[in-house]
């Protein structure tokens, strides 16, 4: 945290060397962050690319959409340095250790042959998590974190290679089960798109018994954890809303989601329950009780902020299938303050560093979604710290 501002400044200096004018911009944050009331002034923590006119119109400004363009820009900047090589289709497969120090890597070339790259200063593992490796997910995380979850990440490279190479060197790793970054709004394939966001934001989270089980406006991670704690690890849960809550979901979207078997409709809670497999009588009672809270302005069950939502007043009711969605894993190899990997005796493995989701001892069992920027932010900062230490030894 002490060095994150410095790392962001360095990143902007590097982006300034590019030709497209990328600008790192603070994200405005309200006094209440993601449903968590702030009792003290918040320290702004989230950055985006809101002032970068070079982004295509469909990229958006948040890191999840603009990130690929930033990475492409950084590749072009890297090519300006004669002492820096970019090797694609050349995965590392094994670390090389000489005289108790990691001194290089074995790589697999695009033609299927193997080669060795020697490292005079050190090897930095920046291989991400293992969310694309089902075997490691099952072995190292809680069943409820993946049993009914879909997979959001569009990349296929996060298979835990750095974790496994480090363990082979005797590295220490976070204890199991390790934390998973979950989002709500998952669908059986991936992640519901923007057409559904208003409906999901205004609606209720309902289990098969027709009952609420969470304050719906909590941070994504908290809602996902609550859903995964339901019977069957959250299977059979729904977002329930009416037609007044679904701005952006047109008739075409309704038919599409119905055709996929994700969306159900009814004129009454009982009719909706029969269509979706929800206890309709309980659902009717849940909606009636929830609507009654608006008169006094207090959600007596979960303390949801009713000023930012609305009661059920429509004549068409919908239930949208929902599940958690795995974005990334947050457990990794144990490191010290210089991002050097430690062995099982807490001793430094000389020459070996781990950063980002390949590194550990950062998230204590859960990802704190109410503190923006902790995942990408630590990847940037730890990469900066590790590279500096490897080059300067300090």
Image (spheres, rainbow, N blue to C red):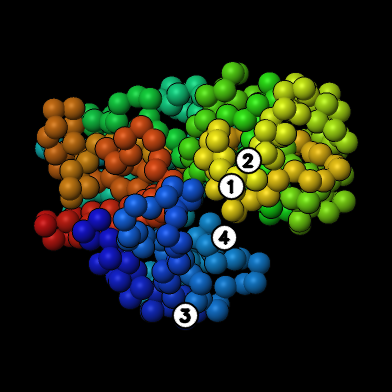
Q: Residues within 10 Å of mark 1 (few under 14, many from 20)?
A: few
Question: Label 4, label 2: how many angstroms apart (C-alpha)?
Answer: 37 Å
Q: Which residue is mark 2?
A: 293
Q: x%, y% of residue 339? A: 22, 47
Residue 284 vs residue 80: left or right? right
Q: Secondary structure at mark 4?
A: helix
Residue 278 vs residue 362: left or right? right
Q: Which marked residue is nearer to the observer: mark 4 or mark 2?
A: 2
Q: Could you tell me if the residues under marks 1 and 2 are in contact, i.e. CB atoms within 8 Å? A: yes
Q: Residues within 10 Å of mark 3 (few under 14, many from 20)?
A: some
Which residue in the rendered view is the most extreme toward the front? Answer: 296
At a point 44% along the width and 62% down the height, the residue shown is: 29
319 to 198, vertically: above or below: above
Q: Which residue is mark 4?
A: 65
Q: Which marked residue is nearer to the observer: mark 1 or mark 4?
A: 1
Which residue in the rendered view is the most extreme toward the top? Answer: 231
N-terminal-most mark, 4 or 2? 4
N-terminal-most mark, 1 or 4? 4
Q: Which mark is drawn over residue 297?
A: 1
At a point 18% along the width and 36% down the height, the residue shown is: 342
Question: Label 1, label 4: how many angstroms apart (C-alpha)?
Answer: 36 Å
Q: Which residue is mark 3?
A: 21
Q: Secondary structure at mark 2?
A: helix
N-terminal-most mark, 3 or 4? 3
Question: Label 1, label 3: how many angstroms apart (C-alpha)?
Answer: 47 Å
At a point 51% along the width and 43% down the height, the residue shown is: 218
At a point 56% along the width and 43% down the height, the residue shown is: 298
Question: Label 3, label 2: how many angstroms apart (C-alpha)?
Answer: 49 Å
The answer to whether residue 98 is seen in the rendering is no
């Amino acid at each position: 945290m002490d060095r994150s501002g410095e790392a962001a400044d360095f990143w902007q200096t590097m982006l300034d060397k590019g030709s497209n004018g990328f600008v790192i911009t603070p994200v405005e944050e309200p006094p209440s962050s993601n449903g968590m009331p702030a009792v003290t002034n918040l320290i702004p923590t989230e950055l985006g690319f809101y002032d970068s006119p070079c982004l295509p119109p469909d990229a958006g400004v948040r890191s999840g959409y603009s990130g690929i363009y930033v990475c492409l820009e950084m590749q072009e900047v890297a090519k300006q340095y004669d002492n820096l090589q970019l090797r694609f289709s050349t995965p590392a497969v094994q670390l090389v250790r000489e005289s108790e120090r990691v001194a290089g890597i074995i790589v697999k070339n695009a033609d299927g042959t193997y080669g060795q790259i020697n490292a005079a200063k050190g090897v930095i593992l920046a291989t991400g998590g293992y969310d694309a490796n089902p075997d490691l997910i099952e072995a190292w995380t809680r069943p409820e974190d993946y049993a009914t979850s879909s997979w959001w990440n569009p990349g296929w490279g996060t298979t835990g290679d750095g974790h496994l190479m480090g363990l082979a060197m005797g590295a220490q790793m976070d204890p199991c089960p390790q934390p998973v970054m979950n989002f709500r709004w998952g669908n059986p394939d991936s992640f519901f798109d923007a057409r559904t966001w208003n409906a999901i934001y205004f609606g209720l989270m309902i289990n098969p018994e027709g009952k609420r089980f969470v304050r719906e406006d909590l941070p994504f991670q908290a809602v996902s954890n609550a859903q995964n704690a339901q019977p069957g690890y959250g299977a059979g849960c729904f977002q329930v809303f009416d037609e007044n809550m679904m701005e952006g979901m047109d008739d075409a979207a309704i038919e599409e989601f119905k055709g996929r078997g994700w969306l159900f409709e009814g004129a009454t809670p009982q009719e909706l329950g029969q269509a979706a497999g929800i206890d309709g009588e309980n659902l009717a009672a849940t909606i009636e009780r929830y609507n009654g809270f608006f008169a006094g302005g207090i959600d007596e069950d979960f303390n949801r902020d009713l000023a930012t939502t609305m009661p059920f007043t429509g004549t068409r009711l919908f239930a949208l299938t929902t599940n958690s969605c795995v974005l990334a894993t947050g457990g990794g190899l144990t490191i010290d303050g210089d991002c050097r990997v430690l062995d099982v005796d807490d001793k430094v493995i000389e020459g070996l560093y781990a950063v980002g989701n390949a590194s550990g001892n950062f998230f204590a069992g859960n990802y704190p979604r109410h503190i923006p920027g902790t995942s990408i932010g630590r990847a940037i900062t730890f990469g900066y710290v590790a590279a500096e230490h490897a080059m300067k030894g300090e």
